[in-house]
Image: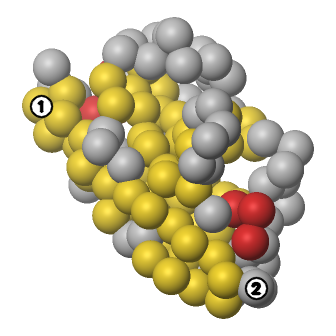
């Protein structure tokens, strides 16, 4: 079992930055690839970014490429999502997820075994 807790969300103006954190507890954090997803009101949850256990492979959704950066610190059992140049369309609840396939990047929800409760990000225009 892995427990995931996101933090760092909030209200920011367009063009601003936020850094989300996802702290994991339970089984060895480095056994998992990690992903970030988001869900806006009235929309389906969508992929944002993913990172393998070592951080050696990273992928982003086209909509955030060049603005968001995912990273992880296995010693702290934490994955981060640095979000820069935020836009109103980035407004959503952001979720981290853990996949027990540490060397694979998953863009869909189904491969992820554990999910956090989410943190709200609101970007004002």
**What's the residue at 53%, 35% (across, down)?**
35
Res 47 visible: yes
Q: Which residue is mark 2?
A: 125
**What's the residue at 43%, 41% (across, down)?**
96
92, 20: nearer the viewer: 92
Q: Position of residue 114 (x, y in %)?
A: 32, 24
Q: Residues within 10 Å of mark 2 (few under 14, many from 20)?
A: few
| Position above or below: 14 against 118 | below
> Distance between the Cα atoms at labels 2 and 1?
39 Å
**What's the residue at 74%, 37% (across, down)?**
59
SS label for mark 2: loop
83, 75: nearer the viewer: 83
Q: Position of residue 40 (x, y in %)?
A: 61, 49
74 left or right, relative to 9: left
Q: Position of residue 42 (x, y in %)?
A: 62, 41
Q: Which residue is mark 1?
A: 26
The reply to whether callout 2 and callout 1 are in contact (CB within 8 Å) is: no
Res 56 visible: no
Q: Residues within 10 Å of mark 1 (few under 14, many from 20)?
A: few
| Position above or below: 20 against 56 | below
Count of numbered marks: 2
Q: Position of residue 87 (x, y in %)?
A: 77, 72
**What's the residue at 85%, 61% (across, down)?**
66
Q: Earlier in the sequence, mark 2 or mark 1?
A: 1
- Picture quarter with the N terminus: top left
56 left or right, relative to 80: right
């Amino acid at each position: 079992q892995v427990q995931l807790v996101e933090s760092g969300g909030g209200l920011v103006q367009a063009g601003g930055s936020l850094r989300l954190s996802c702290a994991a507890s339970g089984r060895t954090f480095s056994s998992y690839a990690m992903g970030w997803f988001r869900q806006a009101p009235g929309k389906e949850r969508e992929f944002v970014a993913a990172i393998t256990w070592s951080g050696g492979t990273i992928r982003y959704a086209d909509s955030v490429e060049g603005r968001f950066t995912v990273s992880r610190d296995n010693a702290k059992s934490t994955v981060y999502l640095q979000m820069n140049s935020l836009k109103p369309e980035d407004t959503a609840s952001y979720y981290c997820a853990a996949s027990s396939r540490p060397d694979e990047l998953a863009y869909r929800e189904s491969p992820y075994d554990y999910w956090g409760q989410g943190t709200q990000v609101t970007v004002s225009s």
